[in-house]
Image (cartoon, grey):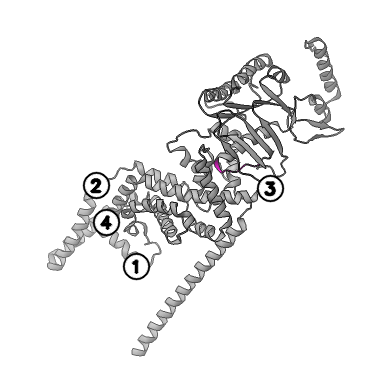
Amino acid sequence: MYNDTVIGLGVILLFLAGAGLLNFYEKKKGRRLFLEKMMASWGKIPQREYSYEELDHISQFFRQREKEGFYIDDITWNDLDMDRIFALINQSVSPVGDECLYDLLRKPVFMEEELKERERLLEFFKVREKERHQIQALLSGIRKPGNVSVFEAVNITKEVEIQGRGFQITMCLAFFLSLLFFMLMPSPGIFCFLGICILNIITYFMKKQDIDLYLNSFRCVIQLLEAQKGLEKLKIPELESYREESRKYRECLRTFQKGSFLVLDQSSAGGGLEGLFMDYIRMLTHIDLIKFSAMMKAMQKHQREIQGLMKIFGYLDSMICVASFRESLPYYSQPELTKEKSAYLHVENLYHPLLSQPVANSIEASKGILVTGSNASGKSTFLKNIAVNTILSQTIYTATATACQAPYFKVMTSMALRDDLERGESYFIVEIRSLKRILDEAEKEGCLLCIIDEVLRGTNTIERIGASSQILADLRRDQVLPFAATHDIELSYILEDLYENYHFEEEVKEHEVVFNYLLKKGRVTTRNAIRLLEMTGYKESLVEGAKRSVEAFEKTGIWKKLRDS
């Protein structure tokens, strides 16, 4: 009998030891695979694609919080394909990294101190691979709460009406009193005890759904607190200020975390005997409902601290993303930004980061820039490039150029507009509203970089030229640097005292059009639209008729009427 007991205990101990070793091996293997993944992705272009719904959730951290100062508005963000720029940079290992990077790209910085701090972190994460991987391992413990963002999961608790804990505490006391009554007087006490147990179970399930709705919200906060605990243990001197700040937030949330397992470890489904036992304890005593009320109250009281933890860990994650993004670029430079009150821009070998084989251009601008050229010659891409580079310079302190000098700019564009069907507004109405917001911003303090593609394209030629020339002239101010693209060559003459003329041109060969995408000084002097019609197979009579119409107009200044043939 004794030997059998010893053998049984030995088997159990061996089983437990084997399970422990297996668990240790699996964790070690997981850490190794994670490390290999991080090393393989460093300096590479991410392949992840985002749906509209995903980007909408990620953007809520930016959209739902109070905004101070200037930020990139929706028109400019969409004009510049900034969702694609975000996807190009983003290699976050945590959802708070996604949200913080998006927020960061929409809020240009106007203070050198903040940009210098970002540069310090970027260089640190670039050269200190071990510490970078340690931080990424911490961040990987912060997981996405279902189909929403971490900010949404946390923010939703602000609107929850917290009911008093009095009823739950009363039910808990009733259970223990009935148990005591049963122990002292078994015969009558059993009925009281069973009745209280049944009542507690019924009322528990009536309230349990209140817990289930917010479990993911609570887990997000616990994961942030665990990440802070991990940062505390690492003791990285270069991140000391972030460790200190996050510690203060964690101290405020100490009561939230203490005993949180009572609410979060709901394990009756596959949790073993221990989990099953704890679930019955919860049902009979309502102890998790009592703790739930306390956690919800703490969560509502400490929203600022929770968002503070989100910002710290999201910020560190986004800085690692930017450091990796820099490694993926063919070249980049630190922009030289000043607090000059007069607008100017000097860039050398500027290229667009979204293009796989970009053509670099350089420009020095201290007055308005008017760009002419045919469709597909590179006008719009160049204008977008100017704006994107300015935003990246003031957000991730990275210029996609060999050199970039400029004042701190607010950036606004009016480019890829369309009819607003929901509001019943035509393209022209949408366009003039878009331009009006730029004119209004031009009245305010601070340097403004504005990019306009085809001013007032939604109206007739005569009024377009008359009105657009006045709009562009009004934008020509000391603190405003306007870039505009147009097909109206007349504007290049009307505005030549206010704007410098640049152009893109193409070479039309016998059977193809060759674009070199190189920016050149002066207005465009060639016209190739009719030649392109001919090359793409339009019938000869139509092409020849178009040529004759143009020749007649150039001689007389009057368009010849067309009649039925």
Quarter placement of the C terminus = top right
Quarter of the image for residue 12 reads bottom left
Question: Does residue 398 show up magenta in the picture?
Answer: yes
Q: Which mark is residue 164?
A: 2
Q: Earlier in the sequence, mark 3 or mark 1?
A: 1
Q: Earlier in the sequence, mark 2 or mark 3?
A: 2
Give the residue pinned by disc 1. 274
In the image, residue 319 above or below residue 348: below
Frontmost of labels 3 and 1 is 3
Query: What is the three-letter code of the residue carrying label 1?
Result: Glu
Q: Earlier in the sequence, mark 2 or mark 4?
A: 2
Q: Secondary structure at mark 2?
A: loop
Frontmost of labels 3 and 4 is 3
Quarter of the image for residue 347 reads top right
Residue 206 visible, this orientation:
no
Mark 2 vs mark 1, CA separation in Å: 30 Å
Query: What is the three-letter code of the residue carrying label 2?
Result: Gly
Mark 3 vs mark 4, CA separation in Å: 61 Å
Query: What is the three-letter code of the residue carrying label 4?
Result: His
